[in-house]
Image (tube, grey):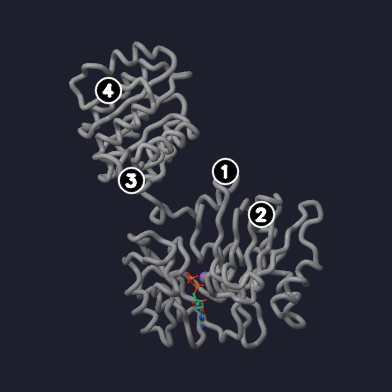
Amino acid sequence: MNIHEFQSKQLFMQYGIPVPDGKPADNAEHAVDVIKQLGGDGWVVKAQVHAGGRGKAGGVKLAKNSDEAAGYTEDMIGRRLITQQTDAAGLPVNQVLIERTYPIARELYLSLLIDRSSERLIFIASAAGGMDIETVAHETPERIRAIKINPITGLQAHQCRTLGYCLGLKGAQHKMLANIMQGMYRLFLEKDASQIEINPLIITETGELMALDAKINFDDNALALHPDIQAMKDPTQEDARENEAQQFGLNYITLDGNIGCMVNGAGLAMATMDLVKLKGGKPSNFLDVGGGTNVEKVCEAFKLILSDTNAKAVLVNIFGGIVKCDVIAQGILEAIKQVHVTIPVVVRLEGTNVDEGRELLSNTGLNLYASEDLSHAAEKVVALAGGAV
Ligand code: GDP
Ligand code: MN
């Protein structure tokens, strides 16, 4: 799960990581209030969306007075912000973060994530902050330094000093960096994060270190343990269909093809998508309806698939293990009638009571094709969707 920058910064404060003074605002009037409360002589207005690359996309604006800040707030709120990290539709801006600005001497990069190959947490740092770190890694890999943390000993003081020297820190700045790294490490473990990124971590002209940006991702599988993090969820920043699917216990991911896929089991769903591609087609979604499929779930699954108007045909691939094929067939027929599915549906059933299931699906008068063989089913659905792409 992703959260907004202002929420990440609230967590940073709890863990002793210095951030600029700031507050979120959801309209221009509120922005003027916030500036009065913050004081200072310069501010930045930052669009709050679950994506980076805002700076280059006009989502970060410097304001010299509260009129300017109010103007930028007005401009940003209610719009969708499109950045390099969003899709073409962008993400809605419902609030901005207003912060005091500080003269910047240098911009650094610091993140903490999981290195899956070594099975350790790893700090990544670079003196080339503020830019896209993938570009730095690609063009000047020598400017990036990584440090792996042994889970038994935890983060060591010498590791912080090593990164500090790489970043060209001086004197008291080493202590500041060590505090920030310890804070990130504790936050990561205590809240079950999967990534914490500070880009840029700035050195102010007075020599202070401060997190100017903050991005935290959390492990969805651990969210049940963290109601405080769960409460930070913002569904407006997520795919509407994927949210809806979650409510019905369906595992759905929007894709950009034209063949809807409804499958039970994630592995079978992936194999099905591979086969559709092999036959020249392109899936419009990934959908695992899970075990214990019933009419309600199949109905919801059809609704989700059809709400994507790119879907021109549907392939249903269900293995009747615990659930019997005739029950599934009945569910499919019921769902097609209830949801008024008019595009062609190819069904491949296999497993317990498969003959009864196929019998039910034949001669229905619906735009429905029962198939005995998965390979044939994939060919059929590609043809019905208008042929190979
Ligand atoms: P991102 O583009 O979504 O990663 O947003 P950031 O928060 O990283 O902001 C992008 C860039 O805007 C930063 O790298 C800074 O150069 C600049 N910026 C952001 N906040 C401030 C600020 O308070 N003062 C100044 N001078 N520049 C800022
Ligand atoms: Mn950034």
Tell me the kind of residue under disc 1.
Asn
Q: Disc 4 versus disc 3: distance between alpha carbons?
A: 25 Å
Q: Residues within 10 Å of mark 2 (few under 14, many from 20)?
A: few
User: Which is more foreground, mark 1 or mark 3?
Assistant: 3
Badge 2 or badge 4: first in the primary sequence: 2
Q: Disc 2 versus disc 4: distance between alpha carbons?
A: 47 Å
**Which mark, residue 221?**
1
Side (left or right) of 166 relative to 6:
right
Badge 4 or badge 3: first in the primary sequence: 3
> Above or below — where is 270 with respect to 144?
above
Tell me the kind of residue under disc 4.
Leu
Q: Secondary structure at mark 1?
A: helix
Q: Position of residue 239 (x, y in %)?
A: 38, 50
Tell me the kind of residue under disc 3.
Gly
**Which mark, residue 115?**
2
Q: Name the residue rendered at 43%, 74% in the picture.
A: 56
Badge 2 or badge 1: first in the primary sequence: 2
